[in-house]
Image: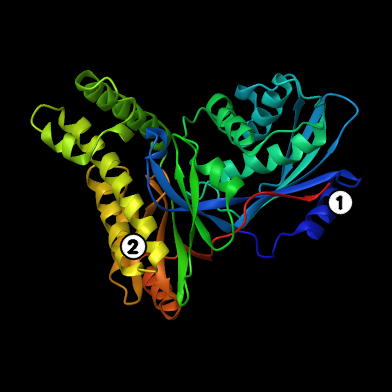
Amino acid sequence: MADAAIDRESTARRFAERFGRAAGVIARAPGRVNLIGEHTDYNEGLVLPIATEQSTWVACVARPDLSVRVASEALDELHTWRVDDWRRETSPHWTSYVAGVAALLRARGARLGGFEMLVRSDVPVGGGLSSSAALEVASAKALILLSGEALDTREVADLCRQAEHQFAGVPCGIMDQSISLLAQADTALLLDCRTRVHAYIPLQLGELAVVVVDSGVRHELAAGEYARRLAQCRAATEYFRKLDPRVSALRDVSPATVRAHASQMDPTLLARALHVTMENQRTAEAADAFARGDFTAAGRLMADSHRSLRDDYEVSCRELDALVRIASTTPGVIGARMTGGGFGGCIVALVRRDAIEPLAERVAREYGERARLVRTRPGRGASIEHG
C-alpha cells in the first residue's frame, strides 16, 4: 500500500509530471470488504459488503488520435495500444480492465478515442479487496465523462462486470462493481444479486473497527478453482431444477431442501449447495444483527461462514485458516472470516479498538511478517473528483 495518502491534488500533480499536461478528468473508486455472503453473488443470492476507505484513482485526458497510454504508479509501468486494437496476449493482466471498459464503451457507440491515463491505488492487489473492480469502476467513471456518455449506475456496473468477464476472463458476480458504485459511508450494503434491490445497513461500530489482515499469499489455482465452483453450482442448480422447474439458481433452494436430498446428491455438489443456501440465510441474519447493533451475533455468523467456506465450499487455505484461528482466539475480536474468493488473500475481523495492537502482535509472532493489517471503515462509493 502507498505510504502517503492519495488525493485529488497529488493525483493531478503526478499526472502532469508523467504526461506533461493537465488531467481532464480524475475519478476514484473504492475497494471492498465483504462482511458476509461469500460466493453467493453468482448464485443470485445475498451479499453484505462495505466499501473500503482505500481507493483506486485514475486521472486521464483525451488524445487527438487513437493511441492509449496508461501508466501504473505502483508498478512503474507504461503501456500503449490503439483503443480499437487491444490484444490480450501481448498486454499485462492489469491493462485488461482499462482496455475492456474502453472497448465496451466504444461498442456502445461512445465517441471515445485515444487517451492518457495514470492509475494510482492504495487497495492491496490480489488480496481479496477487489482491486480489479476498483480499477474498472474508476476507469469507467473517468472514460464515460471523457466520452460525453450518460450511463446510470446499473449500466456502469454491468459494463464493468462484462469487462472482467470478456477481457480478464473472470466469471465474477455483480457484488464488487455494485458496492464500489453504490456505497455510502458508515453503512454496509445488503444487496440482492438477482433483483439488484439493495438496502443500506447502518454500521454504528462505536468502539469496534473493521480490520483486514492480508495473508500475503496468492495461490495460482484461484482462477481455475473459481470457475470450477461456478460449474459445480450450476450442476447443483440443474439437480434441483429437475425437481422443481421454478429453480433457476441456488438462490431458489432452501437449506432444508438440500439436506433432504443429501443421500441422493453427489457429495461435492451437496457440500457446495449447503454452503450457498446457508450463506444466504446467514447474510440476512447478519444484516439484521448489524442493524440492531448486536455485534456478538454478527460475529458468530462470520465464524459460521468461515467454517462453511473452509469445509463445504473448500476455498480457504491453511494460511487463511491460521489467521482466522489467531484472530478468533484474541480477546476483543468479535468475529473473523476469510473474505473474497479464497485460496489466499485476506481475512476480515470485527475488533475492539483496544485489541487491534494485541492482534497485530500475535499475527506477527505466530503467523509472520508477511501478513499486513489494514484498518478500514465503511467508505463512500465511486466519484468524479475533477472534470
Residue under pointer 1: 17
263 left or right, relative to 129:
left
Who's the residue at 69% across and 37% down the image?
140
Query: Given the current orientation, which residue lies at the most extreme bottom position?
Result: 354
Q: Position of residue 82 (x, y in %)?
A: 77, 23
Name the amino acid, label 1: Glu
Look at the picture and state if 267 lies above or below 126: above
Asked if one can make out residue 218 in the rendered structure from this viewpoint, the answer is no
325 left or right, relative to 168:
left
Mark 2 Cα within 10 Å, few/some/many (few <14, many 20+)? Answer: many
Q: Which mark is residue 290?
A: none
91 left or right, relative to 146:
left
Who's the residue at 60% across and 23% down the image?
89
Look at the picture and state if 112 lies above or below 299: above
Quadrant in the picture for residue 167: top right
Q: Position of residue 380 (x, y in %)?
A: 62, 56
Q: In which quarter of the image is the N terminus?
A: bottom right
Quadrant in the picture for residue 72: top right
Asked if one can make out residue 36 in the rendered structure from this viewpoint, the answer is yes
Residue under pointer 2: 298
Q: Position of residue 252 (x, y in %)?
A: 30, 32
Name the amino acid, label 2: Ala
Who's the residue at 83% across and 24% down the image?
66
Say whether disc 1 or disc 2 marks the residue closer to the N-terminus: 1
Q: Which of 206 and 68 is in front in this view?
A: 206
Which is in the foreground here, disc 1 or disc 2? 2
Q: How far apart are marks 1 and 2 (CA)?
A: 47 Å
Q: Which of 124 and 254 is in front in this view?
A: 254
336 left or right, relative to 158:
left
Q: Nearer the viewer, residue 374 or 133?
A: 133
Label 1 element class: helix
